[in-house]
Amino acid sequence: MKKILIISDGAIGDHFIKRVNETYTSENIYYVVQTKQKEPENINPARFKFYEFDPTSLYKLSNLLKMEFIQVFIIMNHQIDVENTIKNIRTIKKQLRLIVLNQWKMQNEDANIVLISANELLASRFLDYLPNVPVIAQNVGLGEGEIMEVLVPFGSSFVYRHIGVIEQKNWRIVAIYRNRKLIMPSYRRMIQPNDLLVLIGAPAVLKSVYRSIKRELGQFPEPFGTNLLLYIDMNIEKHSNVKDLVRSSVYTHKMFKHDLVIKVVNPSNIEILQFIKSFRSVNVVVDIDYASIDLKNGFLNDVKSHHVGLVIVSKNMFKDFYVRNALYEAHVPVLKFANKKFSSVKDSALILSDNRDLEKISATIFDISEQMTFNIDIYNYMDEHQGEKEQTIEHYNNLAKIFSKSIKVIEESENPLKVLRKREDFVHILPFTRKTTMRQLFSLFSTDSEKLYYKLDDYHQIFIPVQL
């Protein structure tokens, strides 16, 4: 049996003793010192021994401390009594571990004294009830936010998503509470409005996940970042296309209402540079790098330093194998402009595939379409593999009801890539996966629409990472 000493003289201490009596363990025996004995009801006499004396008396306390305690709890109402009780214990037991309720901003450098701040505990508990603030497990694990509880609001991007298609890298959904009942998550389980999710993962990752669960339409390019980056390499880009590229980027920046950074590397045309500089303003930053730089490292540094949430490039830039791989490794959405007016686009065009990647990026698609006032057209190629596609369509129909956004599901017996090439007023939105970085030669005989994205190279395209 492990002996534990509790020194108490107030209501908090009495409540603590009551809670201890209700705990599961029977391996501890508790010695309780009170200035005025208040033995709780239904106390277990085999586990509790009560004493009535003033613990600030060294003589009286020393007799009790002849026993070997593993821990002492001090829960008292007056600072002077706490300080003298600690002094008395340290006179007899130099290394005994003390847990002390601190109501007065007491400071102590003794490694074996744990000061529990009453104000911090109360403030933390009240914070748990604030809306839009994550509830973090305080006394489980490290208590640093690696265990989090999140309420899924009605307009969340996670509502009506299947758990199996949510990319969970460095974090996991480990439990769902629905209607005050525990539901164990499974691959096919669908998240409902007002579900309470219990998450485990790296604290920094969970903060990002929390923002994603709570965010509603109108936030893009968040949670990927806050600014837009137009990236122009004048060794790759045709000079005749740059002006239209800049105009389309400025138009996009005004629609999303986020700052635009225009980054030019390998500058080689003074007239074009002057044109670009003319767009400088409070919300448009022009950054021209005259030095020769390493493409990949320079680009990734720009994304990080400018907190970029959307990268804008031309189709010539995206066609470059090394540029495309650098864009993929940045893990941010990419808007690829074709040689057409972006302002004339009316619809977002999606092509369903068997892997349900479109369900993973659905919230971002709805957000982009809402801010840009696009309709959403979903093309379903009616082959024999319809099971996964039907679940994706169900998910989009549910989100359409939540966000009051109309969608159109177009069932095609012909390859949608061929159908879309007959249209003009759309932007093709698709997942940004490793398949997109492959050289075109390796996908010539593929039937995967994601691998064949380049078949719509003459149209605007938005590539969205499937990971948060």
Image: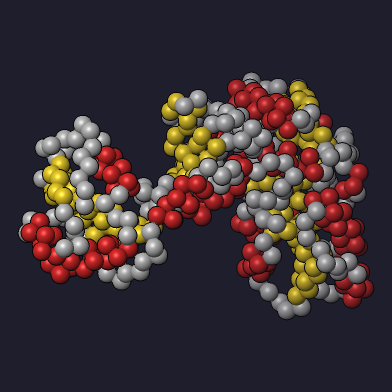
* Residue 52 spot, x, y in % from top left: 16, 50
Report the residue at 10% width, 45% height from top. 1
For the view shown, which residue lies furthest in the bottom direction? 291
Report the residue at 27% width, 39% height from top. 18
Tell me: 372 left or right of 153: right
Residue 433 in the image: above or below residue 157 = below
Tell me: 246 left or right of 445: right
Residue 310 in the image: above or below residue 387 = below
Report the residue at 62% width, 53% height from top. 331
* Residue 378 spot, x, y in % from top left: 75, 30
Report the residue at 42% width, 46% height from top. 137
How did the renderer colour the structure?
secondary structure
* Residue 78 spot, x, y in % from top left: 32, 60
* Residue 346 spot, x, y in % from top left: 87, 38
Q: Nearer the viewer, residue 328 or 162?
A: 162
Number of numbered callouts drawn: 0
Q: Nearer the viewer, residue 448 or 113?
A: 113
Q: Nearer the viewer, residue 291 or 141?
A: 141
For the view shown, which residue lies furthest in the front direction? 36
- Give residue 94's quadrant in the image: bottom left
Q: From this viewpoint, is residue 197 visible? A: yes
Q: Nearer the viewer, residue 30 or 148?
A: 30
Residue 162 in the image: above or below residue 457 = above
Tell me: 122 left or right of 443: left
Tell me: 289 left or right of 189: right
Q: From this viewpoint, is residue 418 visible? A: no
